[in-house]
Image (cartoon, rainbow, N blue to C red):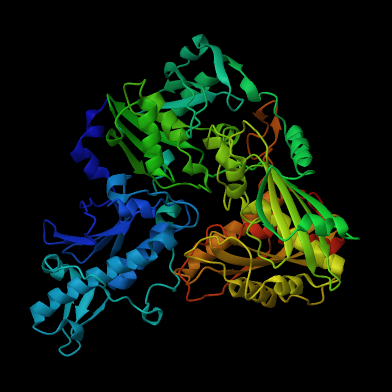
């Protein structure tokens, strides 16, 4: 083992993040002078949970460093997986600090729960959680620089201005670089409540900026998890149980060990609980190619375990059975929909079904690990590095403080890299090798051992009043709950609440309604897929609203607008801090419709569909225009209107909206994971189809309905409505309803 890998100086030299100061509960900011005369400002953030904050635990989440050469370094603790978080979080600080953006370096922090708290990146939450504190961090540093400049110039600080990393004295015309003031600024007290800019004063935020990583990505300089190289490193691949939850029966490595370059063959134990590492056999070699050849030469027998008989057909049959009767848990109820439906002369019923989905990230799972006694270092493209560290500590039975995680650039996450299984697996392999080991998953490994978006069935029954408005709505759904993957206890009531986003939190005013849930047991690993539960629930709800509009002879847009209650909506609040605002939902519907030309005459075989939703506190509406001619579907245009509060970087915001639309369309038209005898059938893009360029919309338009609300996320809100908008457009073009995904024309 190369001991340099664990040497503090070696580690510090290679870490991209600026070291942090330790913060006490009552410290908000801490400043210190740096060797060479720089200024380091660290900012303390409250813990993710209020309980943690009250327990004197704070999250330092961003650090600003200004060097004598007038360059600034901003360190962020969130993971970059193409969403642009390194760019936007740094822009927030740079805006309030009035930095010259061309002289800003951005670094990613290592995983360190004591310094940074929980560093999870997901749920479109990075901007929402960091907005205020990052602004205060930049504003405080600016205040201290102004105080240092005022001392030097002998003037009042409030007479000075800042711009492009300089303090300016308008009276004399003198300009002092931040770098020249950094040492003196470090001696100034941090303000308790720094003055923040108004939006009208923004110079960076709200303007178009390319991602800071674009150049490195385009030129091949970006270092992803798969690119990690360490001295003396070995390489490994793992043959895992083909059945989720299966176990190793026997193996013969005789032929594998004869492959040139193969060093060792070891077993990988299954790790249950919330980690879910599959039992496997690892081949360690001098190269990944040699390891793969060795794996191909293994002779292995597996025990299928209790889930070896699972099939997609059986899943569908069971979910349809469960939704044909009252749910095991009532998630939400208003009035008496059962009584109203029983007395109704005309009840409209529809069943919607969606399959398991793979994350299918561009970069398959991978991780490099080094283990030396009771110490472990991990280089991982992870969304939740703290979870990876804790899970590794538990699996190796070593102190948590002895596990360090370097957060690498991520080649696509979509929720898959929340799970720590691949990092724990790499650590388990490295523990049996006298060298650092990179474990690489093939595309087939990745596809067949994913944490899938669960399959689901929704059955909705409804009736209309004499005015053609919904009088009763009963929604019964079944899905193998994501939360059940991480718990040995079956809690149907909790599962129902957790899995019902997009269904239970009804957006429309219906006097009698219910949402009921029934649990489907499954051994297939489930996990968080972009926008999670709202992907299948919104498809059902927004498709059925269109069906009700057709039954009532109403325009689908007008019906939605009429059902969004301006005054009172009896629904659980998504978040006490971010309550549902009906006018914002109306706003995106009206904006999308106006920009798309809703109601305009269309040629024969063409149709428009509309749908809306709320996901992770952001509002989105989409209009899809399609044609179906001679049995061939063409998506001509998608118009999306989104309300996420202020859009900090429109370039990155549009990219997130567009990416969500394309991924949502891919799931609606192509993607499906099939289970046969407990095994995942699909293994690569040949049988797990994703949307091709020639199948994608000819035009995607994004329009932001900016409000003065607290900013929320854009990574996920465009995904949930798109399948329903597409299905509704196809109906408008053909008169045929599609209630099962993927859609087959």
Is 6 on the left-hand or right-hand side of 507?
left
Is 599 on the left-hand or right-hand side of 2?
right
Spot the residue most to the right.
Answer: 345
x, y percentage for residue 506?
66, 61
Is 649 on the left-hand or right-hand side of 508?
left
Is residue 307 something one can see in this rendering?
A: yes
x, y percentage for residue 404?
31, 38
x, y percentage for residue 327?
72, 45
Is residue 456 something one can see in this rendering?
A: no
Residue beneath the point at 47% across and 21% down: 269
Is residue 645 or residue 551 the one in the foreground?
551
Is residue 62 or residue 662 the one in the foreground?
62
Residue beneath the point at 24% across and 52% down: 18
Is residue 527 or residue 263 the one in the foreground?
527
Q: Is residue 395 above or below residue 602?
A: above
Q: Is residue 455 above or below residue 176?
A: above
Q: In the rendered image, which quarter contains the N terminus? A: top left
């Amino acid at each position: 083992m190369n001991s340099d890998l664990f040497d503090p100086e070696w580690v510090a030299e290679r870490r991209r993040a600026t070291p942090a100061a330790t913060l006490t509960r009552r410290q908000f900011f801490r400043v210190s002078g740096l060797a060479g005369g720089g200024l380091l400002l660290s900012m303390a953030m409250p813990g993710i949970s209020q309980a943690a904050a009250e327990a004197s635990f704070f999250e330092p989440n961003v650090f600003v460093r200004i060097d004598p050469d007038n360059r600034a370094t901003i360190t962020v603790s969130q993971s970059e997986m193409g969403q642009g978080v390194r760019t936007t979080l740094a822009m927030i600080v740079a805006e309030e600090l009035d930095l010259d953006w061309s002289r800003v370096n951005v670094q990613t922090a290592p995983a360190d729960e004591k310094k940074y708290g929980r560093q999870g990146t997901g749920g479109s939450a990075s901007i929402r959680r960091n907005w205020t504190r990052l602004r205060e961090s930049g504003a405080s540093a600016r205040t201290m620089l102004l105080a240092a400049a005022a001392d030097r110039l002998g003037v009042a600080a409030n007479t000075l201005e800042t711009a492009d990393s300089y303090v300016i004295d308008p009276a004399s015309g003198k300009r002092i670089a931040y770098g020249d003031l950094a040492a003196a600024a470090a001696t100034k007290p941090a303000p308790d409540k720094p003055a923040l800019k108004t939006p009208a004063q923004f110079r960076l935020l709200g303007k178009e900026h390319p991602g800071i990583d674009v150049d490195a990505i385009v030129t091949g300089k970006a270092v992803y998890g798969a690119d990690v190289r360490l001295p003396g490193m070995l390489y490994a691949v793992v043959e895992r149980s083909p059945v989720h939850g299966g176990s190793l029966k026997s193996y013969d490595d005789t032929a594998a060990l004869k492959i040139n370059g193969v060093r060792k063959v070891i077993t990988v134990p299954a790790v249950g609980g919330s980690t879910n590492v599959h039992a496997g056999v690892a081949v360690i070699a001098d190269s990944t190619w040699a390891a793969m050849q060795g794996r191909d030469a293994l002779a292995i027998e597996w025990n299928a375990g209790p889930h070896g008989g699972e099939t997609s057909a059986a899943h569908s049959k069971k979910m349809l059975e469960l939704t044909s009767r009252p749910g095991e848990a009532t998630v939400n109820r208003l009035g008496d929909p059962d009584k109203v439906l029983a007395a109704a002369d005309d009840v409209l019923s529809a069943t919607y079904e969606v399959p398991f989905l793979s994350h299918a990230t561009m970069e398959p799972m991978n991780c490099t690990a080094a283990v030396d006694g009771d110490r472990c270092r991990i280089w991982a493209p992870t969304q939740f590095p703290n979870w990876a560290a804790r899970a590794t500590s538990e699996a190796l039975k070593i102190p948590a403080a002895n596990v360090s995680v370097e957060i690498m650039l991520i080649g696509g996450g979509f929720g898959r890299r929340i799970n720590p299984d691949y990092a724990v697996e790499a650590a388990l392999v490295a523990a049996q090798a006298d060298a650092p080991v990179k474990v690489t998953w093939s595309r087939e490994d990745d596809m067949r051992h994913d944490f899938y978006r669960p399959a689901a069935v929704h059955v909705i029954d409804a009736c209309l009043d004499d005015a053609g408005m919904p009088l009763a709505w009963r929604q019964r759904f079944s899905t193998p709950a994501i939360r059940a993957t991480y718990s040995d206890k079956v809690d149907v009531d909790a599962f129902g609440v957790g899995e019902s986003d997009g269904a239970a939190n009804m957006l429309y005013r219906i006097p009698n309604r219910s949402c009921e849930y029934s649990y489907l047991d499954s051994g297939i690993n489930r996990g968080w897929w972009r926008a999670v539960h709202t992907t299948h629930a919104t498809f059902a709800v927004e498709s059925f609203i269109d069906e009700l509009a057709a039954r009532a002879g109403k325009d689908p847009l007008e019906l939605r607008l009429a059902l969004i209650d301006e005054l009172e909506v009896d629904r659980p609040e998504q978040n006490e801090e971010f309550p549902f605002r009906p006018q914002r939902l109306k706003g995106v519907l009206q904006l999308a419709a106006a920009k798309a030309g809703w109601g305009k005459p269309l040629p024969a075989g063409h149709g428009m569909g509309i749908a809306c939703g709320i996901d992770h506190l952001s509002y989105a509406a989409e209009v899809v225009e399609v044609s179906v001619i001679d049995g061939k579907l063409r998506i001509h245009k998608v118009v999306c209107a989104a309300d996420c509060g202020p859009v900090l970087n429109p370039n990155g915001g549009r990219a997130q909206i567009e990416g969500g639309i394309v991924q949502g369309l891919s799931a609606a038209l192509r993607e499906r994971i099939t289970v046969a005898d407990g095994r995942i059938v699909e293994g690569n893009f040949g049988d797990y189809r994703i949307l091709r360029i020639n199948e994608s919309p000819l035009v995607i338009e994004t329009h932001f309905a900016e409000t003065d609300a607290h900013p929320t996320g854009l990574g996920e809100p465009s995904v949930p409505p798109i399948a329903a908008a597409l299905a509704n457009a196809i109906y408008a073009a053909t008169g045929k309803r599609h209630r099962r995904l993927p859609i087959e024309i």
